[in-house]
Amino acid sequence: MLELFLGVLTAMGGFVEIGELTFAINAGSKFGYGLLWVAGVGTIGIIVYGEMAGRVAAVRGQPVFNLIRERVGFDAGLVTLMAAVAVNVLTCAAEIGAIALVWQLFVDWPYRAWVAVAFVFLVLAVWVLPFQWIERVFGLGGLLLVVFLVIAVMEAPDLGEVGAAFMPHVPALESTQEYLLYAYYTVALLSSIMLPYEVYFYSSGAVEDRWKPTDVRRNRLIVVLGFVLGSLLCVALIIVGSQFFGPRHVEPQLPGVVATSAAAHFGVAGLLIAIGGMFFAFAGAAIETALSAAYGIAQFFGWPWGRFRPPREASRFTIAWLAVFALATAVILTGVDPVSVVEYSIVFSVVILPLTYLPLLLVAGDRRVMGEYANGPIARALGWLYMGIVTVAALAAIPLLILTHGGQG
Amino acid sequence: MSAARARSRSADIDRSIHLVRDVVDHEIVDAHQLPCGSVDDVELELDPPHGLRPVALLIGPGAWQRRLPSWLAAFARWLAGSAETRVPWSEIAYVGERVALRRTAEELGLGSIDRRLGRWIARIPGG
């Protein structure tokens, strides 16, 4: 029971990362409640595929990249692996940049110095902490972001209007460019909620925690409750964007600006809670992306992997996650704008979603290998529906990125 | 997954093994259930009355590079070398969700890079 409770809370606290924070707040600031339905659609999608990934890991003991290679073959699998590693490095870089920006709010050291400190901190955290601690420390710390839920309520949104906005719709906008920007935000917000690393990490984590077929029900509860609660944070960020930043004509790009909404309501304490929550959420995501890349490589080539093994017994896996942290840090140290790294990581993530989800859908639906735990009619119908949705989003993502000049309109 | 269960389950459903579906690109574990590679290729032998017969599992960069387009294979060779280990078919204990071997990775010459790097990592505190 306690395990379940902690599982739900860590899933909730680990839901938000820098890309989602940025896109949710700006979605609210630019389009009011016009994109709330995307949060709903994305949440159901990540629940559907998160549940499948956890179930396959529990029943077959196999994480996602084992399945990708088995089902789509070596060539297509290798392409997926390279794309996934590239996207994970980019996402990890975005999180490291965001951590440095957050720390800079407290002590005015040069940005690059904080980037280096973040690198050392993350490496030590993964090296020292057992897997369950990594999940819990950062997942539970990320719950500080609940402060945005409180702010969203205090901003007194019209609940009828909020409820109605969950029906998929396209608001009336002024120009074609505005519609393109709306489409870009739709794809980006969907991507930020359904980021592929979440599925890689969740399924590998289930193997790390040695789930058995009897854990299938626990998996379902954690995914449904944890992700619904987590998406409440995303909804809260959209509402705060709409109620607080929209009227002030602010499009917050930096985490510190987002935190000013907490300062406006709760003063210094609010600011500290918001920034603390961001730090844990970003650090958790940085660790999850680095481990996800290493999980993927090790699983694809059949190397021993996992934090349940001491580093010396999974040496190539260990070197892989260290290398991802190093590479991500190097990307940020070049001085590239962390906000654009966030944008690119989100847009390229959606491109690899269909390749990640298809093998999962095929295996989870295969009665020969899953037996009684194969997809039922609901999982099958939703699975194929979302396969269609992410494929459309994947095809539209890069053209929209170009047409909107990277979301600038 | 215990050895016994995987065997009984695959026996319930289907006694024969489909080489491409059940063996190629599946994870390999040794006698201690330690992952030691994926089945990157399979060596076949012509056995006239029965057609082709599998004689060995081929594991390592050298084996999977043959499956890539030549430009990518050249890059992979530069990155990962082209070592390749051959494990005779008779070393397979059973084919389930994974291909399980009868002996340890060390005895079969698998995972040697991991062991070599592991000795370095073991010197770091906490490694």
Image (cartoon, coloured by chain):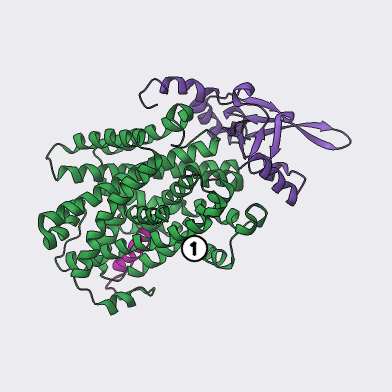
Q: Main secondary structure of the magenta part?
A: helix
Above or below, B119 relative to A262: above
**Residue drawn where x is 73% and y is 44% of the image:** B18
Q: Amino acid at mark 1?
A: Tyr
Q: Which residue is mark 1?
A: A386
The answer to whether B89 appears left or right of A29 in the picture is right
Q: Position of residue B49 (x, y in %)?
A: 89, 36
Is residue B57 left or right of B117 when viewed as pictured? right
Residue B86 spot, x, y in % from top left: 67, 25
**Quick one: which chain is green?**
A
The tint of chain B in the picture is purple
Residue A387 can be seen, yes or no: yes
What residue is at 47 percent from the left and 63 percent from the top?
A389
Label 1: element kind: helix
Residue A168 image offset from top left, x and y in percent: 39, 73
Q: Choose between B6 and A295: the one closer to the eye.
A: B6
> Residue A188 lies in magenta, yes or no?
yes
Residue found farthest to the bottom: A160
- What is the quadrant of the N terminus of chain B in the image? top right
Outermost residue to the right: B49
Magenta residues, start to end = A173-189
- Residue A99 belongs to magenta span: no
For the point 24% across and 51% down, the residue is A277
